[in-house]
Amino acid sequence: MTRIPNSEFKERITKLQTAMAKEGYDIVMAYGNEAEPQFVRYLSDYWPSFETAGVLIPAEGEPLLLIGPESYTYAADRSRIPEIRLLKAFRESSEPEYPGKKLDSFSDVIDEVMHGKPVKKFGVAGLSLVTIGVYSALTEALGAVPVTKADDIVMGIRMIKTENELACMRKAAEITAKAFDYVLENIRPGMTEMQVVGLALGKMHELGAERESYPHWVLTGEGSNQAISRPRQKVITPGDMTMIQIGARVEGYASSIGRPVVFGKATARQKAMIDAGYAGQNAVLSYIKAGLCAGDVARHYENSLAEIGFGDYLLYGPCHGNGMMEGEAPWIENNSTWILKENMTFCLDVFLGDAQTKTGLRMEDVIRITKDGAENLTHYPQKLFEL
C-alpha cells in the first residue's frame, strides 16, 4: 500500500521547528478546512470534515492537533499526532453551542505547549483560510502578540517532494489516467456534463482513490471557455469540443489530467486550438529543468504561443504547484524570480479560451522537475481525440 510512514510525519515537524528557529517563531499553527486541508494534513494526516482544524507546533516539544467538538473519534483514528485537543473555535459553521461539554481554549493549548513561557512571535500557515471566529478567539488569547502569516516556512518544506510523496503522486497519476481512459470509452453525445463527471468519480473510487483532487468539471460547446467551473446539465451534442478535467487523490496527494475531445470531425478552428495547446505544453517540457528562473519558463511559454498566434488566448502562467492540493504554491508566472529545484512538482496547465466562439480547452499533466528536464507523471497521450 502506498503510504507516508509515521517517521516522515515526525521529520516534517522537526524540519518545521528548525525553520521556525531561524525565523524566531515561538509557535506556528497550521490551519485547514474541508476544502483546503493541505497545511493540517501535511503535518498530521487529518482531513477535517464539517469542522476546521489546526496543528499547533511549538519551537520545542511535541505538537497538538486542534479539532472541533464532534470529531474526536474520527481524528483519533486518522491522526499521526497522538495529542488531540477539542476547541469550540473549530466548530462547524452552523455554530452549535455544545452546552455542558468541556472544551479547551486557545489560551489553554498555548499555555500547554509553551509551559507558561510568554509568546513573542506567533505564525499561522494557511492564514488566508482562517475564519473570523477562529481569528477572533486566537487574537483574544494572544493579546498584544500579532499573528504573522507563516505559509512560506511550511511551503518551503513541502515544495521539495520526498520519494514517499512521489510514490503517492505516481499512484494518483496512474488512477487518473485509467479513469480518463474509462471516460473516453463511455462518454457519448446525449450525456450531460454532470453524467460524465459521475463516470470519472465512480471509476476513481473503484481503482482505489480516496477522493477526487478537486471538484471535477466537464464543459461542452459554448461556455467551455471557463478556466474554473463546475459541470452543468448541458447535453453533449455532435460537433462539440468538450473539455474534460479530472484528477484522483491518493493519501492526500492530488493528480490531474485535462484534455479536449471533439465529437465528430474537428473543425479547422478546433484543431488549430488543440494543436496550440499541445504546442504550449511541449514548449515547457522541452525547456524546463532545475536551476532555471521560473519567470524565464513562463516567458518562453508565452512567447511560443504568441509566435503561433495564440497569445491572446492565455489567462495565466503555464504551471502551478501540485502536491497536497491540485493547485498550490508556487505558480510559474512571468514575474517569478525564484529558481526551480529538483523534485518540485507542478501541474503543467495550458488553458486557452476563445472569446469569439466562447469555447476553451485545457491540457493538463503533472510533472516532476529533474536536473535535466521534467518527468511527466501522468503522461497522457497528446493526440486529437475525435469520438
Image (tube, grey):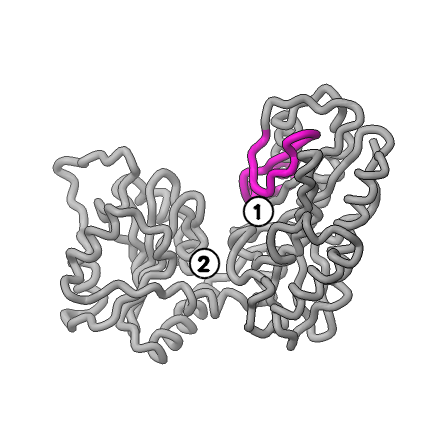
The image's mark for residue 267 is none
Q: Quadrant of residue 248?
A: top right
Q: Is residue 206 magenta?
A: yes
Residue 47 is situated, as x and y percent measured from the top left of the image, at 42, 47
**SS class of the residue under badge 2?**
helix
Q: Is residue 222 magenta?
A: yes
Quadrant of the image containing the C terminus: top right
Q: Which residue is mark 2?
A: 42
Using residue 210 as the reference point, say whether residue 36 is left or right of it.
left
Q: In the image shown, does 199 or 332 lie closer to the viewer?
A: 332
Q: Quadrant of residue 9?
A: bottom left
Residue 332 is situated, as x and y percent measured from the top left of the image, at 59, 63
Q: Is residue 244 visible?
A: no
Label 2 environment density (alpha carbons within 10 Å; few <14, some 14–19, many ≥20)? many
Residue shown at the point (43%, 73%) measured from the top left = 15
Residue 382 is situated, as x and y percent measured from the top left of the image, at 80, 49
User: Which residue is most to the top?
Assistant: 190
Q: Which residue is mark 1?
A: 249
Q: CA distance from mark 2 to mark 1?
A: 14 Å
Q: Amino acid at mark 2?
A: Tyr
Q: Mark 1 and mark 2 in contact (Cβ < 8 Å)?
A: no
Magenta stretch, residue numbers: 203-231
Q: Please say if 144 is above or below 270.
A: below
| Most common SS among magenta residues | loop
Q: Amino acid at mark 1?
A: Arg
